[in-house]
Image (cartoon, rainbow, N blue to C red):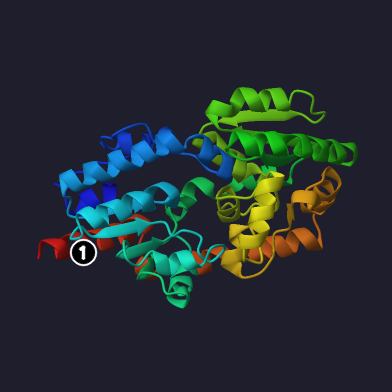
Amino acid sequence: MRALRETAPDTAFGGVGGEAMAEAGFPSLFPLDDVAVMGYLPVLARARTLLRRIRQTAEAAVRARPDVLVIIDSPGFTHAVAKRVRRAAPAIPIIDYVSPSVWAWRPWRAKGMRPFIDHVLALLPFEPDAHLRLGGPPCTYVGHPLIERLPELRPAGADLRHREAEPYSLVVLPGSRRSEIERLMPVFGQALARLGRVLPVEAVLPAVTRHRALIERLSADWPAPVRIVTGEAPKYAAFRGARAALAASGTVTLELALAGVPMVVAYKVSRMEEVIARRLIQVPSIVLPNLILAENAMPEFVQADCTPERLAEALSPLLTGGAARAAQCAALARIDARMRLRDADTPSRAAARIVLEAAERSNA
């Protein structure tokens, strides 16, 4: 939004957005939490609300007749809106900001997007090739927004010294959703207990504000010292000073990679979700930095492999140093070159430029 206004100051916005967009002057039709649902069972439980919000959003977009409709991530919601808008107002160009993970599972979605998506703005450098291979819409790599946060993520002198000091600072990230936290916290706590018997470790646990009480309760009996922080600035400060990380799979692994933090990644889902995922997921890793690097540099432990023993065993050499730590640090150092944009552009400007071009074409 800021980059659009730099080029086109009179740009007006409307639709559905979160807190950061609201702070930038975005009037949301309803709270984003109404549609921020993930997982098969949670979606089924809130199906009636989701359908109502899909209809409301699509109808509002058709009434507004915008120069361009930008849908952002959350394909279960945004693609349903886009299909309705395309049927009712086919002249409105539709841009999808954040590609669905067609390269990971349900690849047929790429081709299925063509009738209602005019352009995809990709956050990951390998996604344009994936859409081309799968017959998806035109797709451009505009860079991940985290690239613009590098000064907040990169450690300075004091941070680097803290990474070498004892007790070792271990960032623990059990996820941002309640189901993730409830499944991973007990395993992470037991892994820390094992580490604490042989190494001096301090756990720093960045918590989503709405789940802080849950995290405090689940970590109350952890034997190792635990420091819980909330907010983005304290989280990034913890990353800058961290010796290593134990993290749930997700975008946070890319944040850690850009901060140069060696990591062990874990994930667990319900038995039903596991059965479905095994049939659909088609990637060699669930860790974003591994996919960007095209190598499994960061160890991952999923489902039955996600045990305290295996997590502790993998974390130990990342804390003490040696070949495993050196190899992962070398891999992390290659992330920048893979994600860099040409001409020293920024992701926000690259995305804004394509959105404005689409709006101008629709008015031509």
Is residue 362 positioned above or below 189 on the image? below
Q: Quarter-wise, where is residue 281 in the image? A: bottom right
Total residue callouts: 1
Residues 96 and 88: in front is 88
Residue shown at 21% from the left, 53% from the top? 88
Residue shown at 72% from the left, 35% from the top? 185
Query: Is residue 244 at all visible to an observer of this figure?
Result: no
Q: Is residue 256 left or right of residue 52?
A: right
Q: Report the residue that reaches farthest toward the left.
A: 364
Q: Position of residue 312 (x, y in %)?
A: 83, 46
Disc 1 residue type?
Glu
Residues 352 and 86: in front is 86
Q: Report the residue that reaches farthest toward the right.
A: 198
Q: Position of residue 230 (x, y in %)?
A: 55, 30
Is residue 78 positioned above or below 171 on the image? below
Q: Position of residue 161 (x, y in %)?
A: 67, 45
Residues 95 and 245: in front is 95
Kind of element beneath mark 1:
helix
Q: Is residue 301 left or right of residue 18?
A: right
Residue shown at 48% from the left, 67% from the top? 108
Residue shown at 33% from the left, 39% from the top? 21
Residue marked by disc 1: 357
Q: Quarter-wise, where is residue 347 in the image? A: bottom left
Is residue 231 positioned above or below 307 on the image? above
> Could you classify mark 1 by the number of other residues whose Cα lies within 10 Å: few (under 14), some (14-19), or many (20 or more)?
few
Query: Is residue 112 at all visible to an observer of this figure?
Result: yes
Name the quadrant of the C terminus.
bottom left
Q: Position of residue 145 (x, y in %)?
A: 42, 53
Residues 110 and 335: in front is 110
Q: Is residue 154 left or right of residue 186?
A: left
